[in-house]
Image (cartoon, coloured by chain):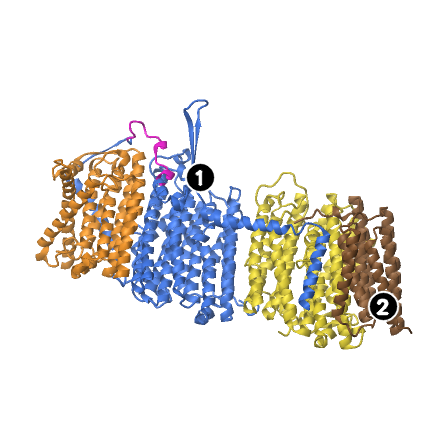
Chain colours: A brown, B blue, C yellow, D orange
Amino acid sequence: MIGAAAVVDGLALLLLAVALFSVTMRGLVSGVWLLVVQSLLLAFVAATIGVSSGAAHMWAAAILTLAVRAFAIPAVLFRVLAAVALKRETRPLLSTRHALIVAVGLALVAYLAAGRLELTGAFPARQALPVSLALIFIGLLLMATRRKAISQLIGLITIENGIFLTGLIATLGLPLFVEIGIFFDLLVAVGVTAVLTLRINEQFDTMNTDELRRLRG
Amino acid sequence: MDGPLPGLVLTWQLDGLSLLFGLVVLSISAVTTVYAIGHARHHHGFPGSGLLYLLFIGAMLAVVVAGDGFTFLLAWETMSLASFGLVLTDHRRAGVREAAWSYLVMTHTATAFIVAAFLLLARTSGSLAFADWSARAPAVDPVAASIIFVLGLVGFGTKAGMIPLHVWLPRAHPVAPSHVSALMSGVMIKLGIYGLVRLSFDWLAPGPAWWGALILGLGVTSAVLGVLYALMEHDLKRLLAYHSVENIGIILIGLGASIVARSLGAQAAMTLALVAALFHVVNHATFKALLFMGAGVIDSAVGTRDLERYGGLLRRMPITGLCFLVGSAAISALPPLNGFASEWLTLQSLLALGRASDDPLTALLPLLAGGALALTGALALACFVKAFGISFLALPRSPQATEAREAGRLELAAMATLAFACVALGFGAVPVVSFIGQLVPLAAVPTAGSALGLTTAGAGRLFVPGVALVLLALAVLAAIVPRLLGPVRSHIAETWACGITLQPIHEYTATAFAKPIRLMFRDIVRPVRDVGIVHRAGTRFVASVHYRSHIAPVFERYVYLAVKDRLVAAAHVVRRAQNGSLQLYLAYVFAAMLTALLLAR
Amino acid sequence: MSLAPLLVAVPLIAALVCAVRGTRAAGVSALAATTTLIVGLVVAFSSFAGPPEHAAAGLMYVDALSGLIVLIIALVAATAALYAVAYVRNAVAAQEIAPTEVRWFYVWIQLSIAAMFAVPLMNNLGLMWVAIETTTLTTALLVAFFRRGHSLEAAWKYLMLGAVGLGFALFGLILTYYAASHALGEAAAALDWDELRANAAALDPALMRVAFALVLIGFGTKAGLAPMHTWLPDAHGEAPTPVSVLLSGALLNCAIYGVLRFHLLTAGTLGAGFSSDLLLGLGAISIAVAVPFVLVQHDLKRLLAYSSVEHMGIVALAVGIGGPLGLFAAAFHMFNHSLAKTTLFVAAGALGQRYGTLRLTRMRGAFEVAPLPALGLVIGTLAITGAPPFAPFASEFGIAQAGFAGRPAALAAAVVLIAGSVLVFGGMLFHVLNVVLRTAPRRLHFAAFPFATAFIGVPLIVLLVMGIWLPPPLRDAFTAVARVLQVAP
Amino acid sequence: MSEILASVGLALAQLGILLVLAPGLNGLIKRMKAVLQGRKGPPLLQPYFDVLKLLRKDSVVSEHASAVFRWAPTLYAACFATAALLVPVFWSRAPLAGWGDAIALVGLFALARFALALAGLDTGSAFGGMGSSREVAVAALAEPALLLVLFAVAWRSGGTDLSTASAYLVSQAVAVVAPSQLLALAALVIVVIAETGRVPADNPDTHLELTMIHEGMLLEYSGRPLGILVWASHLKQIVLFSLITALFFPFGLASAPAEVPIAFGAFLLKLVALAFVMSLVESSSAKLRILRVPELLGAASALAMLALVAEVVIR
């Protein structure tokens, strides 16, 4: 056993790379594909932990991740993008270069913060916790800087992935029926958001959330 | 009955002070209700207004007999809400809504101050019952006592209409129907005084001298400024409202003097001053309610509140005229009536306080307050000569005034009873003062009501019935003696007006009557005057002259409106924080999370 | 066997029936609402009396605190569902809602009621989080029901902010789970409330501080505490009135319930100091933030929404002050606020439909247009802003009294409470007077409002009575809740 | 029973004497002023002739006048008659000493002013209105000064009762020249000038309507009512003069029936002295514009305050 921890660390770093890459991407479709990659990596992480710790429910978690995060959610997103026939993100608030710098900065902050949390009893993968925090911060960055509704949703799902990773590492995932509940919620959330996006597009015939700034005071 | 919070019981308490104020509330409410029934044919309120009126009276009674903080506040605000509803009866007239709103907001802010004061008291004594407060009064540490005193002063002062906090009074009373403003001005503002008396004599131990001096100072300002603003008004009800401010000033002078005496330990002066203040509370309730009822009758007879449109009403409304005359004489503190008796007592108490304090400064302050009180009395006389003279005497200035008809029987009955009360309280000053002397729970030194007449420690004596009797006898003499020189006849002729027949336009107007005083006190009152002259087209000949003068509403503009505008401006600045951008809202959540984590380190 | 599971089951079944038999959806939802009302009352008052009980194979745990929330949800849901019948019929008549949509309206209403009932009943904190997340999702589409630009914008922000907030809460939950599983050992039960509460002392204090901070911000967002409240005025302002009633009356309380559960947990671990001060701080900020938005406001329902922000701040402040009186008053205030806010929203909805707009400048002369809702609006405003004879004054007085008797921070908080409620009183009264008085505009829409006296009259009378005398069952209820919330000082 | 008869007798005697002397005092002042200004002046008894003439003449009443106009003169006269009984002129204790004090005196003056001002307004003529308006304005400034003077006196003698004040001064002869005493005297003299409508404040002899304050109110009266009013205003003047003598030069007051002639002589002497002072003041100064009068009365108040300070602080 070359040590599940090393494998998980590798996967975590891969995840971080994907997240940083998604910050630079403009295309919405490619954004969704990056989500699929993230989900696959997460499923793989869950599987590795399942193997090394022998906890049965980890396998269930891995299968669920595959089913929901890797397949169901991207399917919904692709259908929405197809319906809307819109491919590119308009100019985000931060230019690509600045966004990347901020993203790296956030990753460093994540490493510092994870250091302070010192979850000694957690799964021995040292890299995983900082990466999960980084995912959360980058997800927030995406939501804050992108204008299109779908890209804000992508940011939101990145945050969810980060939290899910923390769960996996810290406590080998929450009790199973809670996990199922969370996955169900995530799916419904994406569904509802998709419906909303379609209605916004139909009402404003654009998905640019700059239109959504009329309710003031 | 147990209240809504654990360990909170709605208790009631009836001691001397509550009895006195209860009597005032009951008697004046009874008379105003009779008046209201009579007045109803002019003034149909909204369907529930009769019920609300009874609730208003009931609430005032409840305030006086409340036994603990919570019940007191319940009754206090129910009273405010009921009167707010009544003030809004004819909300279609211009300015009624703003007046009612400013009234309720100021009263509610005052209640907030009272709540704070009560809770501080509850903090030291551990309970809300008044009995515990007075029992543990000495235990309250001086700093907290001073804070409680100031909070209570602001809270009760606003309700009483003390000068810096009086702004709602001249706005709310005139717009309210007269039977409501009679009750509000006659009785409701007295409950502010009731609160102040409870606060400074019952709930707090004798404090430093500056407490009393503060009230004395505010009393003097209220009295002088109140009467000055009243003089400048030509809206009858606003004039009477400002007079309420003035009379509250006089009561506060008495109250302030008694509190100073209490802190100096001069028992005799304290009792005398407090009795003087309470006697003036009773007196003011009678003549102010009478005057407001009179104003209400005239308003419904002539259709406007503007003095400049009145005139010659004594011929058309003789009984109202007589009652209004008695009320005006009483409020101007003219002998044999009750106003003079209470002002005499207040002056004596100021003198007694002056003599009681040893160091010269605190001796001088009450004496100067006495001077201010005399000024107020004289100005009040001027104001009511104007009010009565312009509205009741000489020629009617408007067609409506010419056709004015006398009020209904019930209204007249109500006014007559109060007029009689003014005379009775004046003549019966001795027994009334001794009755109040016993009621006041302090060490009532038997100074105030000896058999023969009002005597004070300083050997000042006043026996009102005696003076009145002599006055009457000499008046009869003055009428009879000249007849000894043979009969004379009197012929009716035109008033001499330099050869032209007298027109109403020649008569003196209210604004003109007050002009000398306005010019004498111009830097206090700051009149604003604009005169527009319209020439006939192309010629130098004057077609018409428009003269408008009003008094700069100093307090309203520089204090209240300034605060309101700044508050609204600040609100506009803060509102920009909700500018609709989701990104900004996310930043707020993120910032909140970071601060929470930092705090959690 | 406790009736608790019924509370979730009945609305779910009703939702299904509504989905299937669209035409009679209104009747079904009204029937379901009344049954949940009765069941809710039974469950609540039994929880106040006896000790906490388990139900549905340990999945559910009902103690006095959850009983209070169930009571509130039962009342508010019943009012909302019953009022929805008239409201939707008017909306359809005014072409604001397409007839075909009506069925889905009731489906989502019943689903959200089911989710809301689930929140207080769940024993496992994870499932409680899932229930709260479900309430967000079920109400999001309801907020967007009017398909206008504003409603969609409101729903979008509501969803996004809700999701991010609950994300943080989930993170906090995971940290708690980590601390619990290390302290308690066995994995499965680690998130069950009763075990956690029993040996809260064993949890790692440093971790619990971070966890509580995250959960407070997360659930605080859902509860509308400032500065995370920004979605609330949009959502409550733009949603159809029955939904605003549900959101303001019930949903906010569920979120506050979540915060209270974790407050009790953290207090058990590291003493009441840390979490109470955080609650005090957030409460005071919420009151302060609500004031400027009430003083200058252009929309009636947004005005009521900001009042909700203020009152959630007051509840948080009250729990922060603590002490038997403070906690009693907090529970009392949650109940008062829901009752009064429901009436206000119903009155505002009725007026909104009569005027066709909710802009304060265009709503005039309500006394002539619709006397009863206008009266309800005025008296409701007096009640909600804490004018004495009404119950909210009694609870705010209790909170202030506890504050004045407590530690310096509590005293400062009580002063903020008093000052804030006076300013809000001035602002709200100004707007409401402008709406109620003045002369009415000519062109008005027709909107029927059956049983108006019941919807508006009954709650206000109850509030007036409770302001003076509290009926014993309610008194015992709030005392029981206070005992549950009582943390070792 | 007998001492009640005695006190009533004393009261009537005092009132009778003052009534008789009042017009004479006015005539004396007019005569002195004339001599000072180098004229012969009207005969001393001229005011008596005027008053008696008026009392016998018919009166013309304006059609607009109401009951106030008809009853004002009687009330006006009655007020000053009662006031006359409050001041210790001959006897050490004033006839009504037990029933009223200095403040009651001020009150009676106010009541009289109230009646006359209303009467002035009643006929509707502009001059009456102007007279009343200015009368109450001047009085508004005079009263605080008057009261402060009374407080200064009361402070020293222990009470506002005039009889005790004069008795105290008699017993403490040195107090007459105390600084506070002199300041109070100066203030009271100014107030009396304003109250009786003497020159710096108002011109008693003029008939130019625009300048008259006190006369303005009487303009519409004629015949017997005018006679009563004139006689009453003379009485007012002599009461004010006796107030000055009582508070500042109370020597020679009789405490036994034997001393009455001496008291009467002393009183006459004091009256002549005061009359001379008044005529001196009237001849030496010109009438002030109405808006300058506040400065004069302001000075009176200032003097009264100084007297108080001197009394209280320096002692």
Q: Kindly identify the residue that appears in the image at 14 percent across and 50 percent down.
A: D270
Q: Is residue D171 shown above or below D115?
A: below
Q: Is residue B500 shown in magenta?
A: yes
Which residue occupies the foreground of this view, B163 or D172?
D172
- Given the image, on which type of amino acid does mark 1 rest? Thr
Residue beneath the point at 75% across and 43% down: C95
Which residue range is magenta in the image?
B496-514
Viewer-proximal residue among B597 and B280: B597
Name the quadrant of the N terminus of chain C.
Answer: bottom right
Question: x, y percentage for residue B406?
Answer: 39, 40
Residue at 85% x, 68% y: name it.
A9
**Pointers 1 and 2 within a single chain:** no
Q: Secondary structure at mark 1?
A: loop
Direction top: furthest residue: B538
Residue A208 visible in the displayed image? yes
Characterize the local packing of mark 1: few (<14), some (14-19) or many (20 or more) Cα atoms within 10 angstroms: some
Q: Chain of mark 1?
A: B
- Quarter of the figure with residue C172: bottom right
Disc 2 marks which residue? A9
Q: Is residue B123 left or right of residue B496?
A: right
Chain letter of the residue carrying label 2: A
State whether residue B86 is above or below residue C179: above
User: Does the stretch in magenta take in B576?
Assistant: no
